Amino acid sequence: MTFRPRRSVLYMPGSNALALDKARTLNVDALIFDLEDAVDPDAKETARSQVSDAVKQGGYGPREVVIRINGLSTPWGEADLEAAATAGPDAILIPKIFSPDDLTDIEDRLRKAGASDDLALWAMMETPLAMLNAGQIAAAAGTVSPRLSVFVMGTNDLAKETGARLVPGRAAMLPWLMTCLAAARANGLDIVDGVYNDFANEEGFAAECAQGMDMGMNGKTLIHPTQIAPCNETFSASAEEVERARTIIAAFDLPENANKGAIQLDGRMVERLHAEMARRTVVIADAIAARAIETTGSHETLPLHHRSG
């Protein structure tokens, strides 16, 4: 079992050179350099150039670097895709995925652009049609789109397209969030929750992070560096949870328990499926510990206010 932490995934506007540089110091698991919603039309070409240069320069350490392009139906999308394919990020985030056909088209374009075989694709799940086709889109990872590895929920766009209100508890969003999560898990994909817009509301943000964790999300997309630390904490198992997981694993590894489906441990019945869950908990915890980095100024306020999917 392998695992790459994607607890905190921060959107950063590609037009903000200061933000692109500052990203090298943030204790975040993944960075999305945004060429789409966060960039005004008259700054699109500048943003594309700045992001390409920043990614080529590197220096982002263990942080996963992702470029979100404009849709291919826009005047900027094709050039964005070509630039991203040659810049060398870890992944490209594609907006407005409607069906597996969109992924087939992207795969063809990337091959023609000479993209590296290890370049991954992330898919924005942000339209009503994507919700209806979530299972088919996720299944494309095993057929027409082997690069597909992550779903990113675009809850703002879902609210816009459906008229659903983004209220505490996200009642209207829950069916779509869980549909996409089930589709992702059934096909071996990670899934990252949508953004929380009111970044100054610490209590509300904490509650939504906890909700995403309870759902089974890998992490959450963020719009401001101040959201990183609480997000990382919420989407990490506590020391007690990790220790309990190691205890369960050790118990099932004993020779006398090798063929048992369930055992008694500390006065409780524990099934083998709990051992499998425990192994995942430990793998995730070890992966998080392995990528731990020293940062400075991770809570510094930057001019990052923008709209994200």
Image (spheres, grey):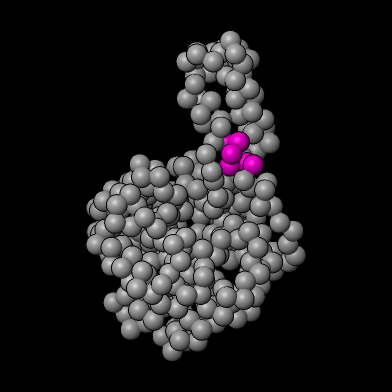
Q: Residue at x 61, y 29 (%)?
A: 245
| Residue 214: in magenta span | no
Q: Residue at x 48, y 70 (%)?
A: 67
Q: As drawn, which residue projects farthest toward the bottom? A: 42
For the magenta stretch, what is the residue range? 281-286
Q: x and y percent of residue 274 in the render?
A: 51, 25
Residue 32 visible here:
no
Q: Is residue 149 above or below residue 40?
A: above
Q: Residue at x 41, y 85 (%)?
A: 41
Prevalent SS, magenta region: helix
Tell how many labels.
0
**207 left or right of 229?**
left
Q: x and y percent of residue 12 in the render?
A: 54, 71
Q: Is residue 171 above or below residue 275?
A: below
Q: Quadrant of the C terminus?
A: bottom left
Quarter of the image where one finds residue 266: top right
Q: Residue at x 56, y 73 (%)?
A: 55
Q: x and y percent of residue 43 in the render?
A: 47, 87
**48 left or right of 75?**
right
- 90 or 240, which is in the foreground? 90
Q: x and y percent of residue 265 in the render?
A: 60, 15
- 226 or 235, which is in the foreground? 235
- 53 or 294, which is in the foreground? 53
Q: As drawn, which residue projects farthest toward the top? A: 256
Q: Is residue 178 above or below residue 197?
A: above
**35 left or right of 263?**
left
Residue 41 visible here:
yes
